[in-house]
C-alpha cells in the first residue's frame, strides 16, 4: 500500500507563503523543477492528491485537467462544494469532500491503490499530522526570507510528532529533505 506524503516548500525563516499568500518567491525554479528526477519520481509514484480548498482556488481549476503535474484523482477538502464542476479528463477527476480529513484520505487511498497520496496545502498537512494520517513529509527549502506569512508547523501537536530523515535532494538553490513520521 502507498504512503500519505505531506510537505511543502519553505523559506529559510519558516514560511510557506508571504503575508499576501503569494508563493512565487519559493518557486523561482518551477520550470526546472518539473524536469528533475525528484519530481518525475514523485509524479510516477503518486496515485491521488488531497488538497485544501485554498490550494484548489489558487489557480484556475479548469486548467488542472490540461496542465496539472499530477494527472490523478484529486480530492478537495472543503466546507462547501462549488456550483461549477471543473474540467476533468480520463486520469484526473475532482471530488469534493465535506466529511473531514479522515474521509478525504480514505477516499484518496482507495483511488491510489498501491501508489502514494500527496497532500497539498498547509491546512490539509496540519490536519493529517494532528490525527496521525501522514507517513512522510517532503520539505523543500529555498534560500529566501519572507519575513512573515503562513507557517506550516502552526497548529501542530508537537508532542505527537517525531521525524526521521530518510532522503536528501539538492538542485540549484533548492534543498529537499524527506522525513518518515514516527507514530
Image: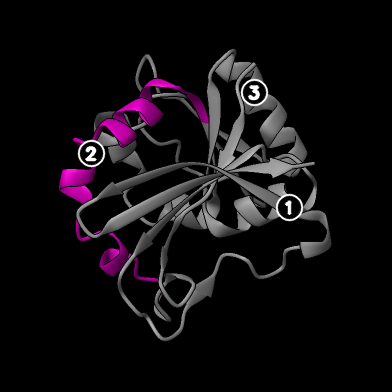
Looking at the image, tell me whether mark 2 or mark 1 is earlier in sequence order.
2
Give the image location of residue 155, x and y in percent.
72, 68
> Mark 3 — residue?
109
Contact check, label 2 and label 1, Cβ < 8 Å? no
Which mark, residue 34?
Answer: 2
Looking at the image, tell me whether mark 3 or mark 1 is earlier in sequence order.
3
Q: Label 2, secondary structure: give it.
A: loop
Please report the bounds of the magenta region as a residue range: 21-48
Q: Residues within 10 Å of mark 1 (few under 14, many from 20)?
A: few
Quadrant of the frame with the C terminus: top right
Query: Is 25 placed left or right of 106 in the picture?
Result: left
Q: Label 3, secondary structure: give it.
A: helix
Give the image location of residue 23, x and y in percent.
34, 65
Q: Residues within 10 Å of mark 2 (few under 14, many from 20)?
A: few
Quick one: 43 or 61, which is closer to the camera? 43
Residue 74 seen in the figure:
no
**Residue at 35% from the left image edge and 31% from the top image edge:** 87
> Mark 1 — residue?
162
Give the image location of residue 100, x and y in percent.
75, 44
Separation of marks 3 and 1 at Cα, in angstroms: 23 Å
Q: Residues within 10 Å of mark 3 (few under 14, many from 20)?
A: many
* Outermost residue, right side: 159
**Residue at 68% from the left image edge and 33% from the top image edge:** 105
Quadrant of the frame with the N terminus: top right
**Residue at 35% from the left image edge and 80% from the top image edge:** 145
Separation of marks 2 and 1 at Cα, in angstroms: 30 Å
Amino acid at each position: 500500500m502507498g504512503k500519505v506524503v505531506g510537505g511543502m516548500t519553505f523559506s529559510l525563516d519558516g514560511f510557506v507563503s508571504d503575508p499576501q499568500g503569494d508563493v512565487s518567491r519559493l518557486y523561482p525554479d518551477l520550470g526546472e523543477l518539473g524536469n528533475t528526477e525528484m519530481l518525475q519520481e514523485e509524479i510516477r509514484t503518486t496515485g491521488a492528491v488531497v488538497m485544501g480548498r485554498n490550494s484548489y482556488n489558487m489557480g484556475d481549476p479548469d486548467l488542472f485537467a490540461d496542465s496539472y503535474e499530477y494527472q490523478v484523482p484529486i480530492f478537495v477538502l472543503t466546507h462547501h462544494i462549488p456550483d461549477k464542476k471543473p474540467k476533468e479528463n480520463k486520469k484526473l477527476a475532482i471530488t469534493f469532500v465535506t466529511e473531514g480529513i479522515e474521509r478525504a484520505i480514505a477516499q484518496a487511498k482507495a483511488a491510489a491503490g498501491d501508489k502514494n497520496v500527496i497532500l497539498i496545502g498547509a491546512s490539509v498537512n496540519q490536519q493529517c499530522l494532528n490525527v496521525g494520517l501522514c507517513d512522510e513529509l517532503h520539505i523543500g527549502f529555498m534560500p529566501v526570507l519572507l519575513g512573515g506569512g503562513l507557517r506550516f508547523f502552526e497548529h501542530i501537536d508537537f508532542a505527537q510528532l517525531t521525524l526521521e530523515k530518510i532522503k536528501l535532494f539538492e538542485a540549484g538553490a533548492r534543498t529537499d529533505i524527506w522525513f518518515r513520521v514516527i507514530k
